[in-house]
Amino acid sequence: MATRSIHEWRRQERPIFLGDFWNDGPEVNGCMAGGHRYFHITNDGDLEPCVFCHFAAENIHDKTLTEALKHPFYRDIREGIPYDGNSLRPCMLIDRPWVFRDHFERYEDVEPTHEGAETLVTSLADDMDEHAKQWAEVAERAWREGDFMGLFPYPPGDKPDYLKAEESEEPAEAPAAAQE
């Protein structure tokens, strides 16, 4: 699974943060979008809150990036993170689609940047809400019980060394590059 590989890659000789946007909510305290820790600029200069959120209120050809990020659309996204504290449900598109719809509906100058993007707020809205509701039941229980590491796709007894060290309360051995 991708999540498993990402966790392993992070702990190899040169630990780096490899962003797994959806599964890294606990790593980054919620969503990274809207300039909170991340944003996406299209080849046309449209400033999207996230590479998966194909809507923009600003274009960097019209104003500076600093000015563009001050738009209330992006500011409201940043200020809402982490929605209710459960960072297992970080995404305003997948986990809480009504949050994005509220942002979209509030600002008349927010426009889709890719063909079909508007379906997130129209024809797919009900299905996305149902998916989010089903995931919320799992994520809320895991968050409450503090058992969210169990959601990662490791077969029983097959966890990476850094997780095994946390369970035994012994410090994990630093990667070779960090020891030099």
Image: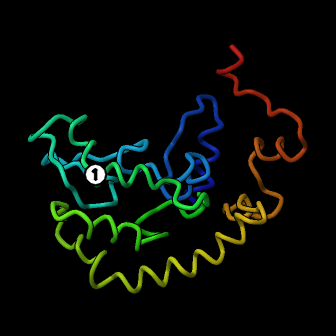
The C terminus is located in which quarter?
top right
Query: Dividing the picture into quarters, in which one does residue 84 lie?
Result: bottom right
Numbered disc 1: secondary structure: helix
User: Is 52 in front, or is 125?
Assistant: 125
What residue lies at 66% left-to-right and 70% top-to-bottom? 140
Q: On screen, 16 above or below 98?
A: above
The residue at which mark 1 appears reads as 72
Q: Is residue 173 left or right of residue 138?
A: right
What residue lies at 26% left-to-right and 52% top-to-bottom? 48
Query: Dividing the picture into quarters, in which one does residue 76 lie?
Result: bottom left
Q: Is residue 68 left or right of residue 79?
A: left
Query: Dividing the picture into quarters, in which one does residue 41 lie?
Result: top left
x and y percent of residue 28 in the render?
55, 46
Q: Residue furthest left?
A: 62
Q: Residue furthest top?
A: 180
What residue lies at 49% left-to-right and 80% top-to-bottom? 131
Q: How many residues crowd around disc 1 within 10 Å: few (fewer than 14), some, or many (20 or more)?
A: some
What residue lies at 27% left-to-right and 42% top-to-bottom? 69
x and y percent of residue 178 in the render?
67, 21
User: Is 5 in front, or is 127?
Assistant: 127
x and y percent of residue 78 in the render?
41, 49
Q: Is residue 7 left or right of residue 76?
A: right
Labels in figure, total:
1
Q: Amino acid at mark 1?
A: Pro
